[in-house]
Image (cartoon, rainbow, N blue to C red):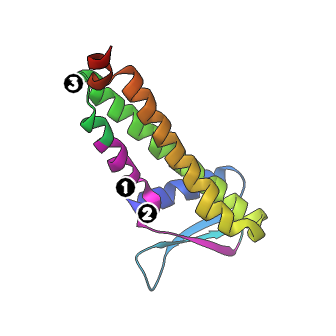
Amino acid sequence: MTNLVSLQIETLLNSFGYQTQVVPHPAEPSMKLILNGKYLARIIEGCNSISIVILFLSFIVAFSGKLKTTFFYILSGSVLIYAVNLLRIVILTLGLYHYPEYSDVLHTVIFPGIIYGMVFLLWIFWVNRFSKLNKNNA
């Protein structure tokens, strides 16, 4: 899955006009991201959004609603999380390239906040709109 995410990031960055290469790291299970000839980052298992999708899915199942609604919300939410994660990594890469002095705050605060904040908002929307929990209290 990490390889697929890496290839999609490479394609997106190339489409924005950057010369991008993603190659397997020789010493660890990750992919090296090279932008315009500069090695910027590693794409590791945690970057592929699977753990975030599992976290999202677990919450939705725990507070499930009607089966059909739950299934479609999980499907659409998972696709949204995956797509936003790709865009998050692309923007993070561009941020690391253009503003390397902000790499720590970009990688550890801002971009995790984006993806986890979106998941939190999806959860709130689910509980308030579709969850059986909300129906029982109405």
Please give left or right for residue 87 compared with residue 58 in the image.
right
- Tell me the residue that label 3 is attached to: 67
Q: Is residue 34 above or below residue 115?
A: below
Q: Is residue 112 left or right of residue 125?
A: right
Q: Residue furthest bottom?
A: 27
Quote the CA–CA distance across marks 3 and 1: 23 Å
Q: Position of residue 40 (x, y in %)?
A: 65, 72
Tell me, yes or no, whether the highlighted magenta stretch contains residue 45.
yes
Residue 138's tag is none
Element type at mark 1: helix
Q: Are marks 3 and 1 in contact (CB under 8 Å)?
A: no
Q: Which residue is mark 1?
A: 51
Measured from the top left, where is residue 105 in percent x and y? 67, 64
Disc 2 residue type?
Gly
Question: Residue placed farthest to the top in the image?
Answer: 138
- The magenta segment is 37-58
**In the displayed structure, does residue 45 sit left or right of residue 89?**
left
Query: Dots 1 and 2: beta carbons under 8 Å?
Result: yes
Q: Image quarter for residue 41?
A: bottom right
